[in-house]
Image: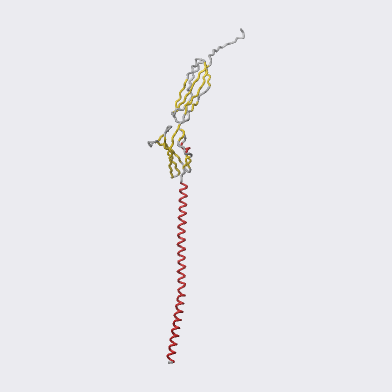
Amino acid sequence: MEENKNNAVSQKTSFIDDGKIHESQDIASAKKLEPSQESKYNKGIIKKILIAAGILIVFIGGYLAYSQYRAVLEARRIDVVFKDDNTEYELGTELKDLVTVNKADQVSVKLIDENGNEVDVPKDDVVYKAVYTCQAADNIKEVTKEIKFVDTIAPLIDGVIENVTLEFGTEYDPKNGVVANDHSGNVELKVEGVVDANVPGEYVIRYIATDGSGNQTIVESTVIVSEQTCGASVTWDDSV
């Protein structure tokens, strides 16, 4: 009986000891696994950091590329600004003076009528489309503007002498050296009045310049034909 009891106690102790041994082994095994889990955790963080850094690098590279692209576009951009919103201009106005253009090496302009034909000599009271072509290096920009020309400026008469004194019998052409100019390129010059160089007196010559729009300029010149004079040659002889 005593022996059986001792055996039972011995088995229980052995069982407890075995449990403790197993439990200690489990704890030791768990402790051995902890460094491996920490390593996996660190690797995961590093992987996330690398991914974030890659995304950041891609973003920065894209931003720099976009900025460079924008800089190239800005360098090639041509700005064309009309100086006013008017549509009516005096006939003969320089069309290139109506715009301000930056960064353009060449600026050309042509007038197109309602039929789509290019016009070299415009007329007043007609609506045209002005086509501006601006070029800078390999970049070209085209803008248009509707324009109607008016003609209110009278032509100019040059070469008229207001007061002329003419010797008797001298030939005189009142048109000599007199010209009429107009921005339309279409002007007519008339001369009214006749000078008779063989008749002494005062004559009035009227110069009338008329352009295609009916604008007129009148200038007058006064011509005085002097009296006829008789010349005599006298030789003195002191011995007489």
Seen in the picture, residue 193 relative to 42 is either above or below; the reply is: above
Which of these two is toward me, 209 or 134? 209
Q: The C terminus appears in which quarter of the rendering?
A: top right
* Residue at the farthest top position: 240
For the residue pair 83 and 60, the one nearer the viewer reads as: 83
Q: How many marks on residues? A: 0
Q: Position of residue 139 (x, y in %)?
A: 44, 45
Q: Compared with residue 182, is residue 69 higher up or lower down, i.e. above or below?
A: below
Q: Which picture quadrant has residue 190?
A: top left
Which corner quadrant holds the N terminus?
A: bottom left
Q: Position of residue 192 (x, y in %)?
A: 47, 21
In the displayed orientation, state which residue is furthest to the bottom: 1
Q: Quadrant of residue 212?
A: top left
Q: Position of residue 127 (x, y in %)?
A: 42, 35
Q: Which color scheme does this rendered protein use?
A: secondary structure
In the picture as drawn, the residue positioned furthest to the right comes out as: 238
Residue 133 lies, in percent from the top left, at 43, 41
- Nearer to us in this view, 150 or 222: 150
* 212 relative to 39, above or below: above
